[in-house]
Image (spheres, grey):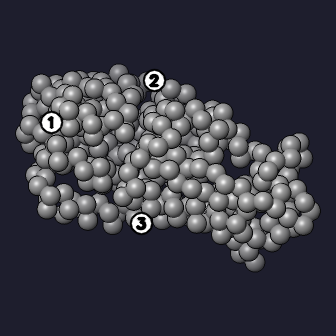
Amino acid sequence: MNRRALMTSAWAIAGAAGTGLATGCSRSPSATTEPLDVLLGESVQPTNPMVVAERFFADRVAELTEGHCRVTVKPGGELGDEQRMAEMLRTGKLAFSKILLANLTAYDKRLGVASLPYAFSGRDQFLDSMRGDFGRRCTAIMAMHGFVLLAFFYAGDRNFYNRVRPIHTPADLKGLRIRVPQNIVAIDMINALGATAVPLATNDIGSALQQRLVDGAENSMVFYTSEQHMRHAPYYSWSRHQQSVDVLLASAKWLAERPVPMRDAILEAGRLTQEEELRLWAAATEENAAVAQQQGARLNDVDVAPFRRALVNVVSRHRSNFGDLASLLPDAS
C-alpha cells in the first residue's frame, strides 16, 4: 500500500473513532465531521507561480483529507505583510503562509545566512543544500519558533532593476535608492555596492517605484514581471547576487490541534508541492523574461566578479553571525 493510500485509510479510521486526536490534544473543530476552512497568506500577486503552487497545495490537502480541510489562498498581501503573517502563524491565528526565509531573522538571525551574497554558485548547488544538512538545520531552527516547514520554495536568482540605467558594475549603482527586504544582510549588501538601501515590505515595492520613493529594487525575473515593475523600472541586470528561498509554513500551534491523519496529509501535501513549485518556477523564469522584453524591459548580463569583490567584506562581517549554519554553506567559489 502506498503512502497516500495509508493516509486515506488512517483518515477513515480517525473519522470512525470520532476524534482521531493524539493523546494530550484538546478536542478541536477539525475532529468533527464539519469541514475545516483555513487560510494561506501570501504577499505576492495571483499571477506568481508560487501562488499557483499554493493552490496546488490546497487541492492536495483537500484530496488527502477527503475534504475535511479546505485551504483558501489569499495572495497580494491581503492578510498583511510577511512579518505580520509570521506572527499570526506563531500565535495560531493563521494556518499557513509563505515567507521569505530571510524575513524570519527577527526570530533567529541565523536564518538570514542564505541571503549572504554569492553564498551559492547557482540553482543546482542551492537546491542540493536545501535538500541536505543545511536545509534540515534551517527546518529545526524554524520549529523552535513555532513554524512547521511544509516546503522550500525556490524563488530564483535575485537581480537588480531600476528606472535610471543598466547596471554593469557596482559603480552603476552609486546614488540609486534600492528597495531591499527588511534584513540587515540585504541592507549592508546594497550600501556596500554604493547604493542606498531602502527596507520595505514586499507589497509596498510597486507603489514606492511608482512614486519614485525608490529608484529600483532587486528580485527574481518572475517577481519583476508578475508585479509589473517594468512599468516603472525598465532596466533589469542579471547580477545573480543571491539565490532566494521562500518557505511554505504551517503554524505549529494550529497544526498540533489537528487530528494525526490531517497533520500527516498536510505534510504530504507540502512534500508534493515543493516539487511542483520547482517545476513551475523553472518554466516561468524563461517565459517571464520574454514577456518583460515584450513590455519594454531592457535586459543585460553582468560580470559578477566585480560584485563579488565589492561584497567580500560584507560576507566576512556577517558570516560569523550565523553560527553552525554558516559552516554548512557550500564552497561557492
Q: Residue at x 45, y 50 (%)?
A: 75
Q: Amino acid at mark 3?
A: Arg
What residue is drawn where x is 38% and y is 33%? 201
Which residue appears at 39% of the width and 59% of the height? 49
Which corner quadrant of the image does residue 52 belong to? bottom left
Question: Judging from the image, what secondary structure is the residue with disc 2 in?
Answer: helix
| Residue at which label 3 appears | 279
Residue density around tag 2, few if under 14, some if 14–19, many if 20 or more, within 10 Å? some
Residue 208, x across and y down, in percent: 25, 33
The span from disc 3 to disc 1 (Cα, nearest Å) is 32 Å
From mark 1 to mark 2, how far is it between C-alphas? Answer: 25 Å
Residue 306: give its label: 1
Q: Are marks 2 and 3 in contact (CB under 8 Å)?
A: no
Q: Earlier in the sequence, mark 1 or mark 2?
A: 1
> Residue at coordinates 18% horizontally, 57% vertically from top-left?
292
Amino acid at dot 2? Asn
Q: Is residue 302 visible?
A: no
Residue marked by disc 2: 321
Element at badge 1? helix
How far across and how far down the image is residue 66, in percent? 72, 69
Describe the element under mark 3 as helix, strand or loop.
helix
Residue 219, placed above or below residue 201: below
